[in-house]
Amino acid sequence: MATANAYANAKDFQVEHIGPAPHTLRNILTATGIVLLIGLLSLFYWHTKTDGNVAIGELEQFREAMYNRCGGQQFSGPAEQPLTQLYVDSSRIRTVVVQQFHQLQRANVNCEEVVKALRSVDYPIR
């Protein structure tokens, strides 16, 4: 009976929360931040991949123009993976290849100068 009275008396009192108050807003902002960070990283990697595909297209156009204007078996067919990776990663090589592609579009192209320019940026030529 004493425990029943103690239980009845305890029900009448409100229990105070022990510890820090819940941080609902902080948890929502943290989750939102994580989702935004994942979204931005995904966008960055998607853009990088797209940029790489554009660069590979540039390289293929240059190689085709070089093969058609100056010959050379090393420029025939698709580029090998190490060359494409080097091209995508190097802005110097990309700049020179685009410049030399425009040189190849001219009527009086000097193939030796094109090769010399490519070698100046360590473009692998056999």
Image (tube, rainbow, N blue to C red):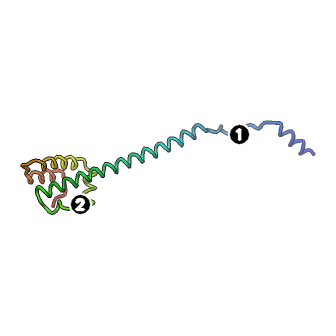
Which residue is drawn at the image coordinates 21% and 50% (left, top)?
93
Rendering coords of residue 6 (x, y %): 87, 42
Rendering coords of residue 4 (x, y %): 89, 44
Residue 11 in which image quadrant = top right
Q: Quadrant of the C terminus?
A: bottom left
Q: Nearer the viewer, residue 51 or 37?
A: 51
Instruction: Find disc 1 in the rendering and name its residue.
Output: 18
Position of 111 with respect to 77 (left or right) is: left
Instruction: Find disc 2 in the rendering and name its residue.
Output: 78
Which residue is drawn at the image coordinates 19% and 53% (left, top)?
62
| Figure disc tally | 2
Rendering coords of residue 1 (x, y %): 93, 45
Residue 60 in which image quadrant = bottom left
Per the image, label 1 sits on a secondary structure element best described as loop
Position of 29 with respect to 50 (left or right) is: right
The amino acid pointed to by label 1 is: Ile
